[in-house]
Protein backbone atom coordinates (compact mmCIF):
# COMPACT_ATOMS: atom_id res chain seq x y z
CA UNK A 1 0.00 0.00 0.00
CA UNK A 2 1.40 3.39 -0.97
CA UNK A 3 0.32 6.51 0.90
CA UNK A 4 1.78 9.98 0.45
CA UNK A 5 1.37 12.65 3.10
CA UNK A 6 1.44 16.26 2.06
CA UNK A 7 3.84 18.48 3.98
CA UNK A 8 3.33 21.55 6.13
CA UNK A 9 0.52 20.22 8.30
CA UNK A 10 0.25 21.39 11.90
CA UNK A 11 -1.41 18.96 14.30
CA UNK A 12 -2.00 20.09 17.87
CA UNK A 13 -3.35 18.13 20.83
CA UNK A 14 -4.40 15.07 18.86
CA UNK A 15 -3.91 11.75 20.61
CA UNK A 16 -2.14 10.55 17.45
CA UNK A 17 -0.74 12.92 14.86
CA UNK A 18 -0.36 10.23 12.18
CA UNK A 19 -1.43 6.64 12.71
CA UNK A 20 -0.30 4.08 10.10
CA UNK A 21 -1.03 0.37 10.07
CA UNK A 22 0.54 -2.01 7.50
CA UNK A 23 1.75 0.79 5.24
CA UNK A 24 4.90 0.82 3.13
CA UNK A 25 6.66 3.32 0.84
CA UNK A 26 4.98 6.36 2.38
CA UNK A 27 6.60 9.65 3.31
CA UNK A 28 5.80 11.86 6.29
CA UNK A 29 7.65 15.14 5.95
CA UNK A 30 7.74 18.79 7.05
CA UNK A 31 4.94 18.57 9.59
CA UNK A 32 4.53 19.95 13.11
CA UNK A 33 3.29 17.60 15.81
CA UNK A 34 2.69 19.34 19.12
CA UNK A 35 0.97 17.99 22.23
CA UNK A 36 -0.08 14.63 20.74
CA UNK A 37 -1.37 13.28 24.03
CA UNK A 38 -4.63 12.63 25.84
CA UNK A 39 -4.95 12.23 29.60
CA UNK A 40 -7.66 10.46 31.56
CA UNK A 41 -8.44 10.80 35.26
CA UNK A 42 -7.72 7.75 37.34
CA UNK A 43 -8.59 7.17 40.98
CA UNK A 44 -5.80 4.61 41.31
CA UNK A 45 -2.99 6.60 39.74
CA UNK A 46 -4.21 10.17 39.66
CA UNK A 47 -4.15 10.20 35.87
CA UNK A 48 -3.30 8.19 32.76
CA UNK A 49 -1.92 9.64 29.55
CA UNK A 50 -1.27 8.17 26.13
CA UNK A 51 -0.42 9.37 22.67
CA UNK A 52 2.17 9.59 19.91
CA UNK A 53 3.03 12.20 17.31
CA UNK A 54 3.69 9.48 14.71
CA UNK A 55 2.47 5.94 15.26
CA UNK A 56 3.63 3.22 12.84
CA UNK A 57 2.78 -0.42 13.35
CA UNK A 58 3.64 -3.27 10.98
CA UNK A 59 4.81 -0.60 8.54
CA UNK A 60 8.00 -0.93 6.51
CA UNK A 61 10.19 1.10 4.11
CA UNK A 62 8.72 4.49 4.99
CA UNK A 63 10.46 7.88 5.28
CA UNK A 64 9.99 10.29 8.19
CA UNK A 65 11.85 13.47 7.26
CA UNK A 66 11.90 17.11 8.34
CA UNK A 67 9.22 16.96 11.03
CA UNK A 68 9.05 18.88 14.28
CA UNK A 69 7.99 16.51 17.04
CA UNK A 70 7.28 17.80 20.52
CA UNK A 71 7.30 15.31 23.35
CA UNK A 72 5.01 16.64 26.09
CA UNK A 73 5.83 16.08 29.75
CA UNK A 74 3.52 14.69 32.39
CA UNK A 75 2.08 18.06 33.35
CA UNK A 76 1.71 17.12 37.00
CA UNK A 77 0.06 13.77 36.34
CA UNK A 78 1.17 11.14 38.81
CA UNK A 79 1.07 8.37 36.23
CA UNK A 80 1.67 8.50 32.49
CA UNK A 81 2.29 5.74 29.99
CA UNK A 82 2.38 5.16 26.25
CA UNK A 83 3.58 8.65 25.43
CA UNK A 84 5.97 8.71 22.47
CA UNK A 85 7.37 11.07 19.88
CA UNK A 86 7.40 8.13 17.46
CA UNK A 87 6.04 4.66 18.06
CA UNK A 88 7.79 2.50 15.52
CA UNK A 89 6.97 -1.11 14.69
CA UNK A 90 8.45 -2.22 11.38
CA UNK A 91 11.73 -2.48 9.48
CA UNK A 92 13.71 -0.53 6.88
CA UNK A 93 12.15 2.80 7.79
CA UNK A 94 14.31 5.93 7.38
CA UNK A 95 14.10 8.68 10.00
CA UNK A 96 16.27 11.77 9.57
CA UNK A 97 16.37 15.59 9.75
CA UNK A 98 13.58 15.59 12.33
CA UNK A 99 13.61 17.84 15.40
CA UNK A 100 12.63 16.15 18.68
CA UNK A 101 11.80 18.64 21.43
CA UNK A 102 11.06 17.94 25.07
CA UNK A 103 12.94 15.77 27.53
CA UNK A 104 13.00 11.99 27.24
CA UNK A 105 12.19 10.34 30.56
CA UNK A 106 12.40 6.58 30.82
CA UNK A 107 9.68 4.73 32.69
CA UNK A 108 10.35 4.59 36.42
CA UNK A 109 8.06 2.74 38.78
CA UNK A 110 8.71 5.03 41.74
CA UNK A 111 7.97 8.16 39.68
CA UNK A 112 5.26 6.53 37.58
CA UNK A 113 6.16 8.33 34.34
CA UNK A 114 7.56 7.36 30.99
CA UNK A 115 8.09 9.54 27.91
CA UNK A 116 10.20 8.43 24.94
CA UNK A 117 11.40 10.11 21.77
CA UNK A 118 11.27 6.79 19.92
CA UNK A 119 9.72 3.59 21.23
CA UNK A 120 10.33 0.74 21.10
CA UNK A 121 14.04 0.89 20.42
CA UNK A 122 14.55 -0.18 16.80
CA UNK A 123 18.32 -0.29 16.57
CA UNK A 124 19.45 -2.37 13.61
CA UNK A 125 15.99 -2.62 12.08
CA UNK A 126 15.51 0.99 11.01
CA UNK A 127 17.86 3.79 9.91
CA UNK A 128 18.02 7.01 11.91
CA UNK A 129 20.10 8.96 9.41
CA UNK A 130 20.06 10.03 5.78
CA UNK A 131 21.88 8.36 2.91
CA UNK A 132 25.39 9.74 2.40
CA UNK A 133 25.01 13.28 1.06
CA UNK A 134 26.87 16.48 0.34
CA UNK A 135 25.40 19.14 2.61
CA UNK A 136 25.90 22.71 3.69
CA UNK A 137 26.28 23.69 7.34
CA UNK A 138 27.49 27.02 8.77
CA UNK A 139 28.39 28.26 5.27
CA UNK A 140 30.68 25.29 4.68
CA UNK A 141 30.25 22.16 2.61
CA UNK A 142 30.62 18.66 4.06
CA UNK A 143 30.00 15.09 3.03
CA UNK A 144 28.47 12.52 5.33
CA UNK A 145 25.28 11.32 7.02
CA UNK A 146 22.65 13.50 8.68
CA UNK A 147 20.72 12.20 11.67
CA UNK A 148 18.12 13.97 13.81
CA UNK A 149 18.11 16.81 16.35
CA UNK A 150 17.38 15.69 19.92
CA UNK A 151 16.70 18.73 22.11
CA UNK A 152 17.75 17.12 25.40
CA UNK A 153 21.02 15.72 24.03
CA UNK A 154 23.74 18.32 24.51
CA UNK A 155 27.14 16.99 23.47
CA UNK A 156 30.05 18.42 21.51
CA UNK A 157 30.77 18.72 17.80
CA UNK A 158 34.56 19.00 17.71
CA UNK A 159 34.89 18.79 13.92
CA UNK A 160 32.46 21.61 13.22
CA UNK A 161 30.51 19.58 10.65
CA UNK A 162 27.23 19.87 12.55
CA UNK A 163 27.29 16.25 13.73
CA UNK A 164 27.71 15.44 17.43
CA UNK A 165 30.71 13.21 18.01
CA UNK A 166 28.95 10.55 20.09
CA UNK A 167 25.78 8.65 19.07
CA UNK A 168 22.44 9.20 20.80
CA UNK A 169 20.72 5.89 21.53
CA UNK A 170 19.64 4.80 18.01
CA UNK A 171 21.06 7.80 16.11
CA UNK A 172 24.73 7.50 15.09
CA UNK A 173 24.82 11.00 13.56
CA UNK A 174 22.82 13.29 15.89
CA UNK A 175 22.60 16.91 14.77
CA UNK A 176 24.25 19.63 16.82
CA UNK A 177 21.57 22.16 15.82
CA UNK A 178 17.96 21.94 14.58
CA UNK A 179 17.53 20.62 11.06
CA UNK A 180 16.82 24.05 9.55
CA UNK A 181 20.58 24.70 9.80
CA UNK A 182 21.40 21.96 7.28
CA UNK A 183 20.88 22.00 3.53
CA UNK A 184 21.31 18.89 1.43
CA UNK A 185 23.02 19.81 -1.85
CA UNK A 186 23.08 16.43 -3.56
CA UNK A 187 23.71 12.74 -2.93
CA UNK A 188 27.33 11.79 -2.40
CA UNK A 189 29.04 10.22 -5.39
CA UNK A 190 29.58 6.50 -5.20
CA UNK A 191 33.10 5.23 -5.78
CA UNK A 192 33.19 2.76 -8.65
CA UNK A 193 35.37 -0.27 -8.12
CA UNK A 194 37.03 -1.58 -11.31
CA UNK A 195 38.18 -5.18 -11.18
CA UNK A 196 40.86 -6.39 -13.60
CA UNK A 197 39.66 -9.84 -14.63
CA UNK A 198 43.16 -10.85 -15.75
CA UNK A 199 44.32 -10.80 -12.14
CA UNK A 200 41.70 -13.28 -11.02
CA UNK A 201 42.50 -16.99 -10.71
CA UNK A 202 39.55 -19.18 -11.61
CA UNK A 203 41.22 -22.58 -11.29
CA UNK A 204 39.52 -23.88 -8.16
CA UNK A 205 41.55 -27.08 -8.21
CA UNK A 206 44.79 -25.23 -7.59
CA UNK A 207 45.97 -25.16 -4.02
CA UNK A 208 47.14 -21.91 -2.37
CA UNK A 209 50.71 -23.21 -2.23
CA UNK A 210 50.76 -23.97 -5.95
CA UNK A 211 49.39 -20.52 -6.72
CA UNK A 212 52.00 -18.83 -4.58
CA UNK A 213 54.85 -20.81 -6.15
CA UNK A 214 53.90 -19.71 -9.68
CA UNK A 215 55.74 -16.65 -10.97
CA UNK A 216 54.91 -14.80 -14.17
CA UNK A 217 58.63 -14.12 -14.80
CA UNK A 218 59.94 -17.67 -14.34
CA UNK A 219 60.44 -20.07 -17.30
CA UNK A 220 58.27 -23.18 -17.46
CA UNK A 221 59.98 -26.44 -16.41
CA UNK A 222 59.75 -29.71 -18.37
CA UNK A 223 60.23 -33.31 -17.29
CA UNK A 224 62.96 -35.53 -18.85
CA UNK A 225 60.38 -37.33 -21.02
CA UNK A 226 59.19 -34.03 -22.46
CA UNK A 227 62.81 -33.07 -23.28
CA UNK A 228 63.38 -36.42 -25.06
CA UNK A 229 60.19 -36.06 -27.10
CA UNK A 230 61.18 -32.57 -28.10
CA UNK A 231 64.67 -33.84 -29.24
CA UNK A 232 63.20 -36.76 -31.26
CA UNK A 233 60.71 -34.45 -32.93
CA UNK A 234 63.52 -32.17 -34.08
CA UNK A 235 65.49 -35.12 -35.55
CA UNK A 236 62.39 -36.35 -37.39
CA UNK A 237 61.86 -32.97 -39.01
CA UNK A 238 65.50 -32.79 -40.15
CA UNK A 239 65.34 -36.35 -41.59
CA UNK A 240 62.20 -35.48 -43.55
CA UNK A 241 63.87 -32.41 -45.06
CA UNK A 242 66.96 -34.42 -46.11
CA UNK A 243 64.82 -37.12 -47.82
CA UNK A 244 62.95 -34.47 -49.81
CA UNK A 245 66.17 -32.83 -50.94
CA UNK A 246 67.74 -36.21 -51.96
CA UNK A 247 64.72 -37.16 -54.15
CA UNK A 248 64.92 -33.84 -56.02
CA UNK A 249 68.46 -34.66 -57.27
Image (cartoon, rainbow, N blue to C red):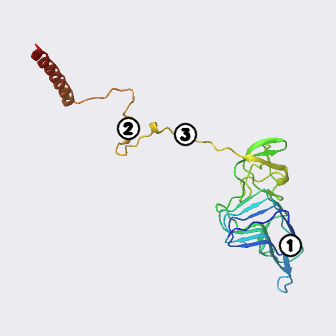
Please indicate, yes or no, whether residue 131 appears anywhere in the rendered image: yes
Q: Secondary structure at mark 3?
A: loop
The answer to whether mark 1 and mark 3 are in CB contact below 8 A is: no
**Residue indicated by mark 1:** 74
Which mark, by number, is residue 211?
Answer: 2
Res. 66 image quadrant: bottom right
- 10 Å crowding of disc 1: few (<14), some (14-19), many (20+): many
The answer to whether mark 2 and mark 3 are in CB contact below 8 A is: no
**Which label's residue is closer to the chain start, 1 or 3?**
1
* Residue positioned 72% across, 50% down in the render: 145
Q: Secondary structure at mark 1?
A: loop
Q: Nearer the viewer, mark 2 or mark 1?
A: 2
Which mark, by number, is residue 194?
Answer: 3
Q: Is residue 103 above or below residue 46?
A: above
Q: How many marks?
A: 3
Q: Nearer the viewer, mark 2 or mark 3?
A: 3
Q: Nearer the viewer, mark 1 or mark 3?
A: 3
- 10 Å crowding of disc 3: few (<14), some (14-19), many (20+): few
Q: Secondary structure at mark 2?
A: helix
Q: Residue 61, position in %: x, y? A: 67, 63
Separation (CA) of disc 1 from disc 3: 57 Å
**Which label's residue is closer to the chain start, 2 or 3?**
3
Q: Residue 127, position in %: x, y? A: 69, 58
Q: Residue 31, position in %: x, y? A: 83, 63
Amino acid sequence: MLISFFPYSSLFSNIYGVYLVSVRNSKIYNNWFVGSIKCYPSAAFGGYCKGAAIYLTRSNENEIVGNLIYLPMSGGMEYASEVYGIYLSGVNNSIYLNDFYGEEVSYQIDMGIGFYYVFPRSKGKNTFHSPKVVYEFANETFEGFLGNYWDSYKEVDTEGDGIIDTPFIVDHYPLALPSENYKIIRPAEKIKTITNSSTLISNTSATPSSILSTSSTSSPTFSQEEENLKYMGTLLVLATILIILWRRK
